Image: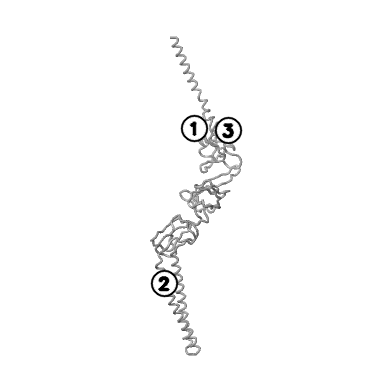
Amino acid sequence: MKRYAGAVAAALTAVLAGSLAVRAKPEGRAESLRAVRTLTLASGPERNVSVYSGEIRARFETPMAFRVPGRIAQRHADVGSAVRKGQLLATLDAADYQLSVQSLGAQVASAEAEGRFQASELARGAELLKKGFISQTEYDRRRNVHDQAKAKLDQARALLSQTRNQSEYTSLRALADGTVTSVEAEAGQVIAAGQTVMRVARLEEKEAILHVPENRLGDLRGADALRVSLWAEPGRTYRGRLREISPGVDPVTRTYVAKVAILDPDPAVRIGMTSSVAIETRAREGAQRVVPLTALVARDGRTFVWRVDAASRTVDLAPVTVGAYSGNGIAVTAGLAEGDMIVTAGVHKLFPHQKVAILEDEAR
């Protein structure tokens, strides 16, 4: 019996010791490692970079149209076709114009014959006037008829030249090297003069089109540098120059259309590609620091960030004062100093004095 009581007492002692060990465990919570991403606020002048997505377009995109009406007989280019200057793009049915050329050619021949006859009549009248066989009035009449015949000949020749031009206008040719970006008429369609048949983008100048919020126009206008990169060619960047900002704002998105000329494009820059435009500006001395929104923690109506002690790799809450939003970040006006390391991901699973494992440390 005594041996049984001793065993029970030993078991109770072991359970009590385990319970005490469990109760003492919270002090060891700081030893558990939580993986976090961090950001180090670098010292020295800061360089702000804002990136906007855009689209590569040609600066000049020409609507191609026939100068005369008619029915399209054939189209010789499709969307995406590369064309050369003078290349045939489309043709109209030119039968009626050719018949008009033939008709006016016959009128010119008739007017030329009439002109030659009246010229001989005028010369004969001059001889008769010298000999006194006709009066001055009769000679003046013959000269007037001759002048009328000459005017009719000039008129017929002008009409023939105009009709020949119209006949040539039934062939639509490219004005410069470029790429067909759209086709707006098909073979068999009857079109009016000046109606767009296709659009050709000229290749000598290319630009990136982007939409900029109204509160960031100042950064765009005062940028130290503009860098254009391609989604399809991530390793290449091109120098850019702000060429134009639209005077009107989109009523829905409240953004302005900006056009950034690409100064040194190569064949890799093709029309229609997705681009990114980086706007680089140098921050003023004493400028507010921008931290990611994911770094903020709200508790008891106040805003904090988790500041990392570089030596011990532990975190503590640091109260901060925030300012204006900037894209996916927010300006911190007080509470942080240069060189501070803060947590930018995983902030809602931390507690004071907890040790952390740093996944990424990026200076800003």
Q: Residue at x 59, y 37 (%)?
A: 339
The image shows residue 157 at horizontal and vertical percentages of 46, 73
Q: CA distance from mark 2 to mark 3?
A: 93 Å
Q: CA distance from mark 1 to mark 3?
A: 19 Å
Of the pair 40 and 207, the residue shown nearer to us? 207
**What is the three-letter code of the residue carrying label 2?**
Gln
Mark 3 residue element: loop
Q: Earlier in the sequence, mark 2 or mark 1?
A: 2
Which residue is labeled 1 in the image?
A: 349
Q: Nearer the viewer, mark 2 or mark 3?
A: 2
Residue contact at pointers 1 and 3, CB within 8 angstroms: no
Mark number, residue 310: 3
The relative height of residue 50 versus residue 146 in the rendered view (above or below) is: above
The relative height of residue 277 versus residue 23 in the rendered view (above or below) is: below
Q: Earlier in the sequence, mark 2 or mark 3?
A: 2
Q: Residues within 10 Å of mark 1 (few under 14, many from 20)?
A: few
Q: Residue furthest bottom?
A: 132
- The answer, for residue 298, to whether it is visible in the render is no
Which residue is labeled 2 in the image?
A: 102
The image shows residue 262 at horizontal and vertical percentages of 54, 52
The relative height of residue 92 versus residue 13 in the rendered view (above or below) is: below
Q: Quadrant of residue 285?
A: top right
